[in-house]
Amino acid sequence: MSNPILLAQLLSDLRGTDKFKQRLALQRLGQLKDPAALPDVLEKLRDTDRTIRALAVQALGSLGGEAVIPHLAEALNDIHKDVRRAAVFALGRTGSTIALPVLVGALLGDDNSYVRWEAARALQLLGDSQALPGLLEALAADENSYVRYAAAETLGEIGDPVALDGLEDALLNDDNEYVRYAAARALGEIADLSSVPALLRALLTRSNNVWHAAAEALWALEGAVVPEVLDYLVDTDPQMRRAALKATIWLTREYDEEFGQRDDEDDDYELGVGCSFMN
Protein backbone atom coordinates (compact mmCIF):
# COMPACT_ATOMS: atom_id res chain seq x y z
CA MET A 1 0.00 0.00 0.00
CA SER A 2 1.23 3.51 -0.78
CA ASN A 3 2.16 6.11 1.79
CA PRO A 4 -1.14 7.72 2.92
CA ILE A 5 0.49 11.11 3.39
CA LEU A 6 1.93 11.03 -0.15
CA LEU A 7 -1.38 9.84 -1.56
CA ALA A 8 -3.26 12.66 0.19
CA GLN A 9 -0.82 15.24 -1.18
CA LEU A 10 -1.08 13.92 -4.73
CA LEU A 11 -4.86 13.90 -4.61
CA SER A 12 -4.81 17.44 -3.27
CA ASP A 13 -2.61 18.51 -6.18
CA LEU A 14 -4.89 16.71 -8.61
CA ARG A 15 -7.96 18.52 -7.27
CA GLY A 16 -6.23 21.90 -7.41
CA THR A 17 -5.99 24.37 -10.27
CA ASP A 18 -2.26 24.15 -11.05
CA LYS A 19 -2.03 22.21 -14.33
CA PHE A 20 1.64 21.42 -13.83
CA LYS A 21 0.96 19.87 -10.42
CA GLN A 22 -2.01 17.98 -11.82
CA ARG A 23 0.14 16.41 -14.53
CA LEU A 24 2.83 15.39 -12.05
CA ALA A 25 0.20 14.00 -9.71
CA LEU A 26 -1.32 11.83 -12.45
CA GLN A 27 2.06 10.47 -13.39
CA ARG A 28 2.90 9.67 -9.78
CA LEU A 29 -0.51 8.16 -9.05
CA GLY A 30 -0.06 5.84 -11.99
CA GLN A 31 3.19 4.67 -10.45
CA LEU A 32 1.67 4.20 -6.99
CA LYS A 33 -1.18 2.03 -8.35
CA ASP A 34 -3.35 2.76 -5.31
CA PRO A 35 -7.03 2.09 -6.16
CA ALA A 36 -8.06 4.79 -3.70
CA ALA A 37 -7.06 7.34 -6.36
CA LEU A 38 -9.45 5.89 -8.94
CA PRO A 39 -12.44 8.26 -8.45
CA ASP A 40 -10.26 11.36 -8.74
CA VAL A 41 -8.43 10.04 -11.78
CA LEU A 42 -11.72 9.19 -13.48
CA GLU A 43 -12.86 12.75 -12.90
CA LYS A 44 -9.92 14.00 -14.97
CA LEU A 45 -11.16 12.16 -18.05
CA ARG A 46 -13.49 15.14 -18.49
CA ASP A 47 -10.79 17.78 -18.15
CA THR A 48 -10.59 20.43 -20.88
CA ASP A 49 -6.80 19.92 -21.15
CA ARG A 50 -6.04 17.06 -23.55
CA THR A 51 -2.70 16.36 -21.85
CA ILE A 52 -4.46 15.96 -18.52
CA ARG A 53 -6.98 13.59 -20.12
CA ALA A 54 -4.21 11.54 -21.72
CA LEU A 55 -2.30 11.29 -18.44
CA ALA A 56 -5.48 10.27 -16.65
CA VAL A 57 -5.98 7.50 -19.19
CA GLN A 58 -2.40 6.32 -18.66
CA ALA A 59 -2.90 6.29 -14.91
CA LEU A 60 -6.09 4.27 -15.29
CA GLY A 61 -4.16 1.60 -17.14
CA SER A 62 -2.09 1.09 -14.01
CA LEU A 63 -4.81 1.53 -11.41
CA GLY A 64 -7.89 -0.43 -12.21
CA GLY A 65 -7.41 -3.69 -14.13
CA GLU A 66 -10.54 -4.95 -15.84
CA ALA A 67 -12.72 -2.54 -13.87
CA VAL A 68 -11.45 0.45 -15.84
CA ILE A 69 -11.90 -1.08 -19.30
CA PRO A 70 -15.31 0.58 -19.88
CA HIS A 71 -13.81 3.97 -19.01
CA LEU A 72 -10.85 3.40 -21.31
CA ALA A 73 -13.23 2.32 -24.05
CA GLU A 74 -15.14 5.56 -23.59
CA ALA A 75 -11.88 7.49 -23.91
CA LEU A 76 -11.59 6.11 -27.45
CA ASN A 77 -14.33 8.59 -28.35
CA ASP A 78 -12.13 11.51 -27.30
CA ILE A 79 -11.70 14.18 -29.95
CA HIS A 80 -7.90 14.18 -29.64
CA LYS A 81 -5.70 11.42 -31.01
CA ASP A 82 -3.24 11.58 -28.09
CA VAL A 83 -5.98 10.61 -25.64
CA ARG A 84 -7.23 7.80 -27.87
CA ARG A 85 -3.68 6.54 -28.40
CA ALA A 86 -3.11 6.52 -24.65
CA ALA A 87 -6.38 4.62 -24.23
CA VAL A 88 -5.48 1.78 -26.59
CA PHE A 89 -2.06 1.45 -24.96
CA ALA A 90 -3.69 1.30 -21.52
CA LEU A 91 -6.19 -1.28 -22.76
CA GLY A 92 -3.34 -3.48 -23.89
CA ARG A 93 -1.63 -3.13 -20.53
CA THR A 94 -4.69 -4.50 -18.74
CA GLY A 95 -3.82 -7.87 -20.27
CA SER A 96 -7.50 -8.74 -20.38
CA THR A 97 -9.25 -10.26 -23.39
CA ILE A 98 -12.29 -8.19 -22.39
CA ALA A 99 -10.45 -5.30 -24.04
CA LEU A 100 -9.95 -7.21 -27.29
CA PRO A 101 -13.13 -6.18 -29.18
CA VAL A 102 -12.52 -2.54 -28.27
CA LEU A 103 -8.94 -2.68 -29.51
CA VAL A 104 -9.94 -4.38 -32.75
CA GLY A 105 -12.55 -1.67 -33.22
CA ALA A 106 -9.87 0.99 -32.82
CA LEU A 107 -7.52 -0.86 -35.17
CA LEU A 108 -10.12 -0.99 -37.92
CA GLY A 109 -12.14 2.13 -37.25
CA ASP A 110 -10.08 5.00 -35.86
CA ASP A 111 -9.38 7.71 -38.41
CA ASN A 112 -5.86 8.36 -37.09
CA SER A 113 -3.06 6.05 -38.18
CA TYR A 114 -1.09 6.52 -34.94
CA VAL A 115 -4.05 5.24 -32.93
CA ARG A 116 -4.50 2.26 -35.28
CA TRP A 117 -0.76 1.49 -35.03
CA GLU A 118 -0.91 1.61 -31.24
CA ALA A 119 -3.97 -0.66 -31.29
CA ALA A 120 -2.08 -3.26 -33.32
CA ARG A 121 0.75 -3.14 -30.80
CA ALA A 122 -1.68 -3.37 -27.87
CA LEU A 123 -3.18 -6.51 -29.39
CA GLN A 124 0.34 -7.93 -29.36
CA LEU A 125 0.33 -7.50 -25.58
CA LEU A 126 -2.87 -9.52 -25.33
CA GLY A 127 -1.55 -12.22 -27.67
CA ASP A 128 -4.99 -13.70 -28.29
CA SER A 129 -5.91 -15.44 -31.55
CA GLN A 130 -9.39 -13.89 -31.40
CA ALA A 131 -7.73 -10.76 -32.79
CA LEU A 132 -6.64 -12.55 -35.98
CA PRO A 133 -9.52 -11.48 -38.27
CA GLY A 134 -9.05 -7.82 -37.39
CA LEU A 135 -5.28 -7.96 -37.71
CA LEU A 136 -5.51 -9.72 -41.07
CA GLU A 137 -7.94 -7.10 -42.32
CA ALA A 138 -5.59 -4.33 -41.22
CA LEU A 139 -2.65 -6.08 -42.86
CA ALA A 140 -4.52 -6.40 -46.14
CA ALA A 141 -6.36 -3.10 -46.29
CA ASP A 142 -4.98 -0.36 -44.05
CA GLU A 143 -3.72 2.56 -46.12
CA ASN A 144 -0.85 3.24 -43.72
CA SER A 145 2.27 1.08 -44.01
CA TYR A 146 3.16 1.51 -40.33
CA VAL A 147 -0.18 0.01 -39.33
CA ARG A 148 0.27 -2.89 -41.75
CA TYR A 149 3.79 -3.43 -40.39
CA ALA A 150 2.49 -3.52 -36.80
CA ALA A 151 -0.30 -5.90 -37.80
CA ALA A 152 2.20 -8.30 -39.41
CA GLU A 153 4.46 -8.11 -36.38
CA THR A 154 1.58 -8.88 -34.02
CA LEU A 155 0.43 -11.80 -36.16
CA GLY A 156 3.92 -13.26 -35.86
CA GLU A 157 3.90 -12.82 -32.10
CA ILE A 158 0.53 -14.55 -31.79
CA GLY A 159 1.93 -17.35 -33.94
CA ASP A 160 -1.32 -18.86 -35.21
CA PRO A 161 -1.08 -20.66 -38.59
CA VAL A 162 -4.47 -19.17 -39.52
CA ALA A 163 -2.50 -16.03 -40.40
CA LEU A 164 -0.27 -17.76 -42.95
CA ASP A 165 -2.23 -16.91 -46.10
CA GLY A 166 -2.53 -13.25 -45.18
CA LEU A 167 1.15 -12.97 -44.28
CA GLU A 168 2.22 -14.74 -47.47
CA ASP A 169 0.09 -12.37 -49.54
CA ALA A 170 1.67 -9.39 -47.77
CA LEU A 171 5.14 -10.83 -48.26
CA LEU A 172 4.70 -11.15 -52.01
CA ASN A 173 2.37 -8.27 -52.86
CA ASP A 174 2.53 -5.39 -50.39
CA ASP A 175 3.92 -2.24 -52.00
CA ASN A 176 6.05 -1.37 -48.94
CA GLU A 177 9.26 -3.32 -48.45
CA TYR A 178 9.18 -3.03 -44.67
CA VAL A 179 5.70 -4.52 -44.51
CA ARG A 180 7.02 -7.37 -46.66
CA TYR A 181 9.97 -7.63 -44.28
CA ALA A 182 7.66 -7.82 -41.25
CA ALA A 183 5.56 -10.46 -42.99
CA ALA A 184 8.66 -12.58 -43.65
CA ARG A 185 9.73 -12.24 -40.02
CA ALA A 186 6.25 -13.24 -38.88
CA LEU A 187 6.29 -16.31 -41.12
CA GLY A 188 9.60 -17.27 -39.57
CA GLU A 189 8.09 -17.03 -36.10
CA ILE A 190 5.13 -19.22 -37.06
CA ALA A 191 7.56 -21.61 -38.83
CA ASP A 192 5.16 -23.64 -40.95
CA LEU A 193 6.43 -25.66 -43.91
CA SER A 194 3.48 -24.60 -46.04
CA SER A 195 5.09 -21.14 -46.30
CA VAL A 196 8.17 -22.45 -48.11
CA PRO A 197 6.96 -21.55 -51.65
CA ALA A 198 6.19 -17.95 -50.67
CA LEU A 199 9.48 -17.60 -48.80
CA LEU A 200 11.38 -18.96 -51.79
CA ARG A 201 9.75 -16.45 -54.11
CA ALA A 202 10.68 -13.69 -51.68
CA LEU A 203 14.34 -14.61 -52.11
CA LEU A 204 14.13 -13.20 -55.64
CA THR A 205 13.31 -9.69 -54.46
CA ARG A 206 15.73 -6.80 -54.95
CA SER A 207 15.19 -5.67 -51.36
CA ASN A 208 17.99 -6.77 -49.04
CA ASN A 209 15.65 -6.38 -46.07
CA VAL A 210 13.01 -8.68 -47.49
CA TRP A 211 15.21 -11.42 -48.94
CA HIS A 212 17.27 -11.62 -45.76
CA ALA A 213 14.16 -11.92 -43.59
CA ALA A 214 12.80 -14.60 -45.91
CA ALA A 215 16.09 -16.48 -45.75
CA GLU A 216 16.08 -16.31 -41.95
CA ALA A 217 12.49 -17.59 -41.96
CA LEU A 218 13.59 -20.59 -44.00
CA TRP A 219 16.43 -21.13 -41.55
CA ALA A 220 13.90 -21.11 -38.68
CA LEU A 221 12.27 -24.20 -40.19
CA GLU A 222 15.52 -26.07 -39.46
CA GLY A 223 16.21 -29.48 -40.98
CA ALA A 224 12.63 -30.08 -42.10
CA VAL A 225 12.95 -27.39 -44.75
CA VAL A 226 15.81 -29.02 -46.68
CA PRO A 227 13.79 -31.73 -48.49
CA GLU A 228 11.16 -29.12 -49.37
CA VAL A 229 13.75 -26.80 -50.90
CA LEU A 230 15.50 -29.59 -52.77
CA ASP A 231 12.21 -30.57 -54.43
CA TYR A 232 11.99 -27.09 -55.96
CA LEU A 233 15.41 -27.50 -57.61
CA VAL A 234 13.60 -29.51 -60.29
CA ASP A 235 10.41 -27.44 -60.38
CA THR A 236 8.92 -26.64 -63.78
CA ASP A 237 9.05 -22.92 -62.96
CA PRO A 238 12.58 -21.59 -63.62
CA GLN A 239 12.06 -18.82 -61.07
CA MET A 240 11.35 -21.37 -58.35
CA ARG A 241 14.40 -23.38 -59.38
CA ARG A 242 16.51 -20.24 -59.10
CA ALA A 243 15.01 -19.42 -55.69
CA ALA A 244 15.60 -22.97 -54.49
CA LEU A 245 19.24 -22.72 -55.53
CA LYS A 246 19.57 -19.51 -53.53
CA ALA A 247 17.97 -21.18 -50.53
CA THR A 248 20.22 -24.21 -50.82
CA ILE A 249 23.30 -21.99 -50.81
CA TRP A 250 21.96 -20.02 -47.85
CA LEU A 251 21.11 -23.11 -45.83
CA THR A 252 24.42 -24.87 -46.46
CA ARG A 253 27.05 -22.12 -46.38
CA GLU A 254 28.70 -20.85 -43.23
CA TYR A 255 27.26 -17.57 -41.96
CA ASP A 256 29.99 -14.96 -42.05
CA GLU A 257 29.39 -11.22 -41.88
CA GLU A 258 32.62 -10.61 -43.77
CA PHE A 259 30.89 -11.79 -46.95
CA GLY A 260 29.11 -8.43 -46.96
CA GLN A 261 26.19 -7.31 -49.09
CA ARG A 262 24.92 -9.36 -51.99
CA ASP A 263 25.67 -8.25 -55.54
CA ASP A 264 22.35 -7.33 -57.16
CA GLU A 265 23.95 -7.31 -60.61
CA ASP A 266 24.98 -10.95 -60.37
CA ASP A 267 22.98 -12.60 -57.63
CA ASP A 268 22.27 -16.04 -59.05
CA TYR A 269 24.98 -17.72 -56.99
CA GLU A 270 26.10 -15.20 -54.41
CA LEU A 271 24.18 -14.53 -51.23
CA GLY A 272 25.25 -11.78 -48.86
CA VAL A 273 24.26 -11.29 -45.28
CA GLY A 274 23.86 -7.52 -44.91
CA CYS A 275 20.60 -6.09 -43.64
CA SER A 276 20.02 -2.52 -42.52
CA PHE A 277 16.67 -3.14 -40.84
CA MET A 278 17.27 -6.06 -38.50
CA ASN A 279 16.05 -5.84 -34.93
Image (cartoon, rainbow, N blue to C red):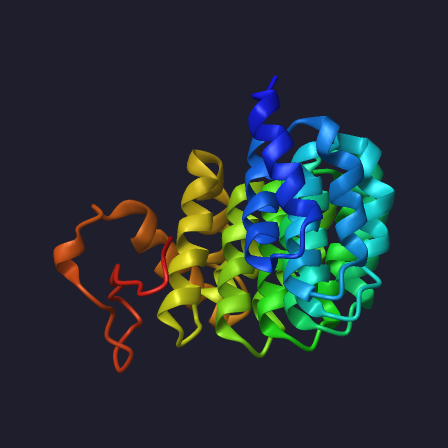
Camera-side residue: 204 or 12?
12
Pick the front one: 204 or 233:
204
**Residue at 25%, 63% in the rendered image:** 272
Q: Nearer the viewer, residue 256 or 145?
A: 145
Q: Is residue 161 above or below residue 261?
A: above
Asked whether the viewer can see residue 16, the reply is yes
**Residue 261 falls in image quadrant:** bottom left
Quadrant of the rendered image containing residue 275: bottom left
Check the image and report above or below for 173 versus 99: below
Given residues 121 and 149, the one toward you in this image is: 121
Image check: 159 left or right of 216?
A: right
In what quadrant of the picture does the N terminus appear?
top right
- Residue at figure coordinates x 75%, y 51% from the top left: 44
Picture quadrant where residue 242 is located: bottom left
Give coordinates of residue 113: x percent, y percent. 67, 71
Seen in the picture, residue 165 relative to 80 is either above or below; the reply is above
Viewed as shown, does residue 100 lie left or right of 18? right
- x, y percent for residue 8: 64, 30
* Residue at the limit of the structure toward the bottom, as seen here: 265
| Residue at figure coordinates x 78%, y 53% from the top left | 45
Query: Does any portion of residue 169 appear in the rendered image?
Result: no
How many numbered marks appear? Answer: 0
Q: Position of residue 13 (x, y in %)?
A: 62, 45
Q: Position of residue 77 (x, y in %)?
A: 84, 63
Residue lying at the far left of the rendered structure: 258
Task: Say whether residue 192 is left or right of residue 279.
Answer: right
